[in-house]
Amino acid sequence: MTAVAVYVHIPFCPSKCGYCDFNSYAMTGEIVERTARAIAQEIRQSPWRGRPAKTIFFGGGTPTYLSESQLIPIIEAVLETHPPTADCEFTSEANPGTVDMPKFAAMRRAGVNRISLGAQSFARQDLIRLGRVHQAPEIVRAVGVAREAGFDEINLDLMFGLPGQSMAGWERNLEIALSLGPTHLSLYGLTIEPNTRYYKLHLRGMLDLPTEDVHVAMYDRAMDAAEAAGLQQYEISNFARPGSQCQHNLAYWRGEEYLGYGPGAVGCFQEDGRRHRYTVLKHPERYCQAIEQGTGLWFDEEWLDEDDLRLEELMLGLRLNEGLSPTIALAERGLKKVLDRGWVEQMDNRLRLTRSGRHFCSEVAAELA
Ligand code: SF4
């Protein structure tokens, strides 16, 4: 059996951030305990039991919102159901306000070998406006504790283009983040998504967002700062020391199979020569009921045809610095247009975005499709 990427979704957070449209719930008490048990049960009943894991990723939500006694059984269920390959990358997302030495040490002992910390900013006002539950000293402390617990691979997530954020504020964030010596950096521009508190504020004109020019300049500055610190860009938003690229996310971007467990998780697997994608029930209560009553767990599923796959390969492959597979069919007129504009270049027989083209990834994908 070929090894596969495995994702586990933990759908709880201490509170809901204003910009967040992920499947996460600020819940406490019995539902959290019930959901943790249900996730472990879902994994143990997996139809793909025995298929080795080449990467495992616990995301959310906030996986470290769970207590050790809730989280470790889920980790054990994954490792027993999907025996890890010798070099299996096992990441857990963590939020600085929800970790301490005993929890990190228990996760490391259980098999997690990479931590992704949702830092987002080191500025007090940014963190308050975002609705985060931590402050800068907790990020610094969390990095130190993660190292002490034995994690060599540490990612920091940072956001730019935040309300009220200046270029100087963004530069300061980059400087502090890089001074902590992470092996990986994920840098995301804020996007305003429907069904979020930020969306309502934005409609009322109450979000003081940087202009588009400043947003673009912030991204350029981030690319320069990361590269200068020895973190090479390998994807539009991701930078890593050599050998520290996130293998799990690379599997997504390269269009490989992945399995998803937990409320709202998405999986995509090959069956009868075709790709099948499913989404697990999102709400923890409905998810738990389905597990407890043994009823259907997927609320959405689709078979992907050739056109769907080509479009996805195009959109995801363009995000990578390694560029598109040479086998993918491209629209000739569109290709000429984006080449003329200097947004793409040919490199080792692969088409990839240029530095300026990274600002126009969606536009390039639309032209090439
Ligand atoms: S911590 Fe992450 S998943 Fe949780 S509410 Fe905030 S942005 Fe959403």
Image (tube, rainbow, N blue to C red):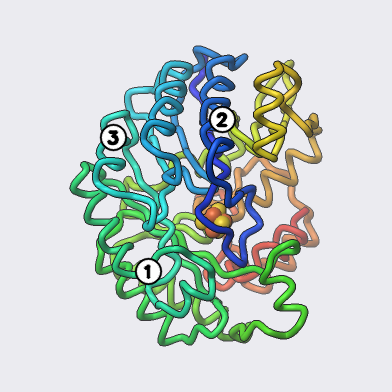
Q: CA distance from mark 3 to mark 1?
A: 24 Å
Question: 189 or 147, which is in the foreground?
Answer: 147
Residue 142, image quadrant: bottom left
Q: CA distance from mark 3 to mark 2?
A: 21 Å
Label 2 Cα crowd, 10 Å radius (few <14 / some 14-19 / many 20+): some
- The answer to whether residue 217 is above or below residue 281 is below
Q: CA distance from mark 2 to mark 1?
A: 30 Å
Residue 11, image quadrant: top right
Label 1 Cα crowd, 10 Å radius (few <14 / some 14-19 / many 20+): some
Instruction: Please name which of the two marks, 2 or 1, marks the residue nearer to the observer.
Output: 2
Disc marking residue 135: 1
> Residue type at mark 2?
Arg
Which residue does the numbered mark 2 point to in the structure image? 34
> Residue type at mark 1?
Gln
Q: Earlier in the sequence, mark 2 or mark 1?
A: 2
| Label 2 secondary element | helix
Label 3 Cα crowd, 10 Å radius (few <14 / some 14-19 / many 20+): some
Q: Residue at x 31, y 41 (%)?
A: 103
Question: 108 or 161, which is in the foreground?
Answer: 108
